[in-house]
Image: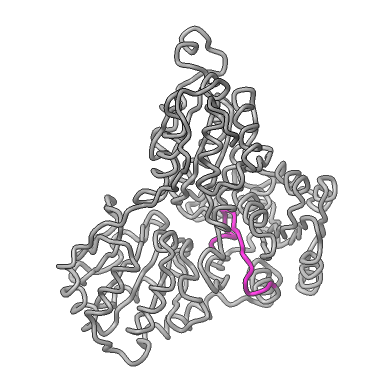
Amino acid sequence: MSSNQNPTGAQLLAATLAAHGCKRAFGIPGGEVLAIIEALAHEGIEFILTKHENAAGFMAEGAWQADGFPPVLIATLGPGVANAVNVVANAMQDRVPLIFISGCVDAEEAKTYTHQIFDHGAMLAPVVKATLTATPSTTAQVTREAIAITRESQLGPVHLDVPVSVAENPATEQLPETIVPNVTSTQSMDEAQIPKCAKLLGEAKNPIAIAGVDAVNENAGPAIEAFCHKFNIPLLTTYKAKGLIDERDGLAIGGAGLSPKADKLVLPAIQQSDCILLLGYDPIEMRIGWRNPWPTNVPVIEITSVERKHAMHEVTHTISNAIGPALEKLGTAMNPGRNDIPQYAANLRSALHETFASGDEFGPDVVFETLRTIMPTETVATADSGAHRILLSQMWHCPSPKTLLQSSALCTMACAVPIAAGYKLANPETPVIAFVGDAGLEMGLGELATLREYNIPVVIVVLVDESLTLIEMKQRASGRPNLGVDFTGSDFPAIAKALGGHGVWIDNTSSLEKETLSALQRDTFTILACRIGRKSYDGKF
């Protein structure tokens, strides 16, 4: 920012975001945020125009997953804010530190002017950690506060309302000479729990560790891998935490959460475990069968930096701290008691692999297995919600965290393409592939134009079965008639061409292999429309 002694509120906001590393903001402008967008550009923060605020928030998440910089969503007042509610709710449940900036009119003006006016904060209250409002004397201060709150304890979104008069007029607040980015403090550890937990875990014959999204957000993968290897403790993860240990590793059981077929193998193994270690595990990702999944007489040790208030399961010992330091303390107090991977873990890995091996007929399982073989190891995949996500999450092997991104708590549709776009935009050297059902792609078709506009060459695999398959399966299982779940098909290759990309129908493995390799060389997006037919997921997950 310039040396202007009277910066506007928008300039203070933009300068503060820039000082915290923000590189991009996503959204749709309106008259109430024009000053903010101009100020962002002055600070070198690129504004990415999308076709819907929901997609803008997911693009912001994808970019944050790629580079770790503050994810920013911008919307105008009224309908802009209302459109964004879904992605803000997703950020709350999926632990994304989204900074949601909206324009608004001044409180006094809102008393006599009602066009597009409603209480943003009241509507967003259930799905944000806080709502803050900028004033002429506090804009930089509340921006720093918003960033800090997104990172406090469990990550999550914060809403910042910026009145037009604050954004456009000189502020009374002065920008500090140096803005020091907020650093989340670490809590002190209750070390009295360490000897008890070390003894329980060290003496266990069949221990198991279960890790969740908080472990990913704490970058605890290296610590978890080292600890599990030192003590030969198998690791099961939620879908969001896949790759905390390379899933080709013998200690990595894989992901679980929504698949009944996987649960039939995984839950009995948990029932037979004699000590369970929870690492940043939040059951918000899990289906109803994960209520109280272990016997009441089994010791359950939880390492968490946040207080757990759910009633999904019981815990006998809690170590309240970040995962990495806690595992270091726990490992120092333990003696290695197992020379080999527990046999049950090896058997479970083998059984899961056999259960989710692809068949001979071209279908979603063949698509996923073929693409995992073709795509480079470092590929980042995204998955939309639907039947394909459950099967993919069981089959797609992740070498590291954040290589399979999805909405796993809220499970919302139309997220995969914008998450992939945001990731590729922030990390263009990494191959990125999005998996989506035909209904999910149709829900967000406008964002294909965003891919064209910003030259984002992601590969989009759409599983075409002309049905809301997951819902149709539930409908059929409950004996209800087929209503409101099937639809006629769209010509996705033609749509891709019309919106500036490339598209092709895929009906067999050889064409899938050929077209995927071509897509990786293309400088625009590619839609691989895989015709799998209705009921292709029956018996698959």
Q: Nearer the viewer, residue 329 or 538?
A: 329
Relative to 478, is 45 on the left or the right?
right
Q: Residue furthest bottom?
A: 339
Q: Is residue 129 above or below residue 451?
A: above
Can you give x and y, in whole percent of width and height, for residue 401 in the image?
A: 50, 67
Relative to 46, is 514 on the left or the right?
right
Residue at figure coordinates x 24%, y 78% from the top left: 201
Q: Nearer the viewer, residue 139 or 394?
A: 139
Relative to 270, is 539 on the left or the right?
right
Q: Is residue 532 above or below residue 209?
A: above
To which quarter of the image does residue 428 belong? bottom right
Magenta stretch: residue 387 in it?
A: yes
Q: Nearer the viewer, residue 187 or 394?
A: 187
> Which colour style is shown?
one colour
Q: Is residue 488 above or below residue 209?
A: above
Quadrant placement of the N terminus: top right
Can you give x and y, in whole percent of width and height, for residue 47 in the image?
A: 66, 40
* Magenta segment: 375-390
Can you give x and y, in whole percent of width and height, for residue 323 in the image?
A: 33, 66
Q: Nearer the viewer, residue 435 or 430?
A: 430
Can you give x and y, in whole percent of width and height, for residue 303 in the image?
A: 29, 64
To which quarter of the image does residue 130 belong? top left
To which quarter of the image does residue 72 belong? top right
Residue at figure coordinates x 30%, y 72% from the top left: 327
Magenta stretch: residue 395 in it?
A: no
Residue at figure coordinates x 49%, y 41% from the top left: 99
Numbered disc total: 0
Residue at figure coordinates x 43%, y 25% from the top left: 137
